[in-house]
Image (cartoon, rainbow, N blue to C red):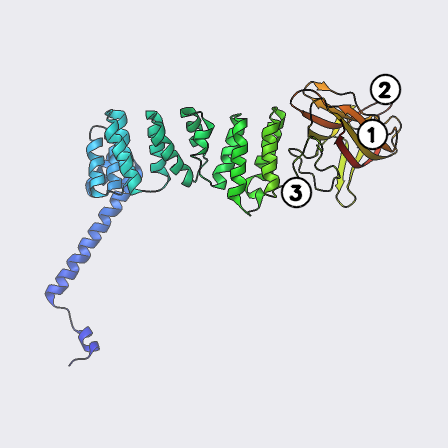
Amino acid sequence: MSSPRAWLSREPAPALRYALSTAAILASIYSAVLGSASHLVSENTAVSAALAAHLVPYNSEYLVREAGWDVKARTALLQRAVAFNPFDTNAWIDLGFDAEVRHGDVKSAEKYFLNAAAANHMFLPKWTLTNFYFRRDELRPFLRWANQTLAITPYSATPVFSEMWLLDPNAADIDGVIPDLPNTLWQYAWFLKNARQWTAIPRVVARLVAAAGGVNPETYGKTTILGPILDELLANGYPNEALQVWRSLSAARWIQLPAPTAERPLVNAAFSVPFWGHGFDWFPSGVSGVAMEQNIESHTVQFELSGDEPEHCTLLQHWLLLEPGRRYRLSWNATLVQLQSPSGLSWHVRRVKQQTPGSPDLLDKAQSIWTFDAPEGDGLALLTLEYARPLGQTRAKGHLSLTQVSLLGIG
């Protein structure tokens, strides 16, 4: 028996050499054809697309390209494409638009779009069907495919939300379609804020914090999304909705403060939690010429007035939920250094254009108390610490240290 080395060293038979040579030549020709077709497709003209499809007639992508240029043969070319490749999503979708727009054949269009969704479970076929049923004003299938689109969309969900509210402006219906995905829910909460659908927001936020679980809340917009939403709810006069959102955040420990009550409206009265600056927490106004610092350990807020601050400005604010007409007592401890009396610093409670008379000047006495009646209305008010330059004085220059602020209902 000959060794493997000897067998390998033998000359191939002439027939085998001929077959191998022919195969190599054919492979080279085939490779050249494919290369030429690919180059022609990249040129993206009517002539080049037709030539590419002629060179490689079984390539569905080339047929779709040619169909884009040849309107008369468009339907036939697309049908050939899906016959060669039933998984060509673009061909099915183009067939659907061709049937719907050019031929008015809605039934065939629906079938083609559904074929695309069966062949490809990703975003594009689902979004195509969502838009199809939106155009047809068919609510049930629209909502079904909108739900599937939202479940996987890698893009902004705002266009889906917009179509939902245009077709069915019913918050309860839409809530049932929005999937419990944190990324989708925070986008929806922001959409509702921009659409001024204030009453629909609390339910969405409750679902958001539940779906997010133990993930860092900043990942889902605690400060950048939900904070501004809270502020706009309050600024637009929706205190109950703001309170519901606050309770959801507090219960999930997204914020370290309890919910306010009519009895105790200040939830961070001792300045013991770093200011979040949104909702029912203190938020500094950021006035030019005034520096502010919160000291958690000493439960103190300190202000440094440079003398260049505006003649009238707000240093600190806090939204309040008060019982309308009830009497309240605000007390505080203020230490002022290098500020002449009167200092021009005082508390105010405002409701839209109404306001109570201001508190005594903060320099009147070291431990100060101010009693006032809550404004009538929905109970929403804004507590502000303001500076107003006293008549005949220069602008204040000095230091204010504020501690032990308390607000209690006493009536």
Q: Helix or strand or loop: what does disc 2 sit on?
A: loop
Q: CA distance from mark 2 to mark 3?
A: 42 Å
Tell me the residue that label 2 is attached to: 391
Quarter assignment of residue 198: top right
Residue type for callout 2: Leu
Badge 2 or badge 3: first in the primary sequence: 3
Tell me the residue that label 3 is attached to: 256
Position of 1 relative to 199 (above/below)? below
Percent across and percent down for residue 171 are 47, 28
What label does residue 369 carry, if any?
1
Point out the image quarter for the N terminus.
Answer: bottom left
**In this rendering, the label closer to the viewer, 1 or 2:** 1
Residue type for callout 3: Gln
Q: CA distance from mark 1 to mark 3?
A: 28 Å
Point out the image quarter for the C terminus.
Answer: top right
Q: Helix or strand or loop: what does disc 1 sit on?
A: strand
Q: How many marks?
A: 3
Residue at 68% over, 35% down:
281
